[in-house]
Amino acid sequence: MQILHLDASILGDASVSRTLSSQIVARLAALHPDSKVIYRDLGQDPALHLSLEHLSAWQGTVAKDPMLVNDLFKGNSYLQELLDSQIVVIGAPMYNLTIPSTLKSWIDRVAIAGKSFQYTATGPEGLLKGKQAYIASSRGGVYSPGSPAAALEHQESYLIGLLGFLGVTDTRVVRAEGLAVSPEAKDEAINRALQEIATIGA
Ligand SMILES: Cc1cc2nc3c(=O)[nH]c(=O)nc-3n(C[C@H](O)[C@H](O)[C@H](O)COP(=O)(O)O)c2cc1C
């Protein structure tokens, strides 16, 4: 059993999504003592944005720039790590109504036609069937269904949609929101999320 753990927050130790994702991984590791955890800190060490040079390299042009060579290797590793994992845990803060661009850069390396999904006569088909995902979601405001800002929610919904597109349909969201409302609201949201994590697998 391999667990892929991703973080994308830029807030270091003060990050709520990092706290939640690490607790989810700890809980899963306790439930699966034989598991191996692969960790990627996308906030600290992101992949580059895709460029014409990346596309040329994918089409066979030999990359010479050491930075590009390194980045192509990193992207291939991202994909292999995802293919080899049974569970992916994603620490995903909301930045400007959606996911951090560093997490999007990871997605740009793993959403590859022929590897993680394919186009068929009846539409796209995800190839990552049978995997589970956990999204550790954090955000300053409140965007839950029914709230006034719900229509602006493009973070969890995007990730759930993207994972589903790749064939990962068993996705659970652990959310701490309203973190900027007040210190009390923040503590309450984090404690509620931590309590929920304690029930994983129970
Ligand atoms: C660059 C940036 C953009 C943000 N944009 C939003 C936003 O659009 N909506 C929101 O509710 N909170 C927003 N926030 C607040 C974060 O979602 C909140 O601080 C959350 O706790 C971040 O997760 P973290 O604690 O894991 O870093 C933003 C924070 C940053 C740093």
Image (cartoon, helix red, strand yellow):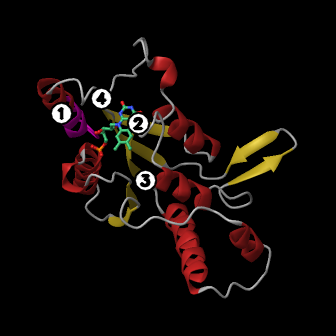
Q: Mark 4–mark 2 contact, CB under 8 Å?
A: no
Give whichever of discs 4 and 2 has the lower sequence position. Answer: 2
Quadrant assignment, res 107: bottom right
Labelled disc at residue 87 = 3
Q: Residue at the location (47% across, 43% down)?
A: 99
Q: Which residues are magenta?
A: 192-202
| Nearest to the observer: residue 119 or residue 142 | 142
Give whichever of discs 1 and 3 has the lower sequence position. Answer: 3
What amino acid type should be assigned to the residue bearing mark 4? Glu
Q: Residue at the location (60% across, 75% down)?
A: 72
What amino acid type should be assigned to the residue bearing mark 1? Gln
Q: Quadrant of ligand 1?
A: top left
Residue at numbered disc 2: 172
* Rendered location of residue 42, percent (x, y): 41, 60
**Cα separation between marks 2 and 3:** 11 Å
* Rendered location of residue 8, percent (x, y): 38, 53
Give whichever of discs 2 and 3 has the lower sequence position. Answer: 3
Q: Residue at the location (32% across, 54% down)?
A: 10
Q: Quadrant of the N terminus?
A: bottom left
Q: Is residue 178 above or below residue 164?
A: above
Q: Residues within 10 Å of mark 4 (few under 14, many from 20)?
A: many
What amino acid type should be assigned to the residue bearing mark 3? Ile
The single residue placed furthest to the right in the displayed view is 121
Q: Residues within 10 Å of mark 2 (few under 14, many from 20)?
A: some
Residue at numbered disc 4: 177
Labelled disc at residue 180 = none
**Cα separation between marks 2 and 1:** 15 Å
Residue at numbered disc 1: 195
**Cα separation between marks 1 and 3:** 20 Å
Q: Is residue 107 above or below residue 180?
A: below
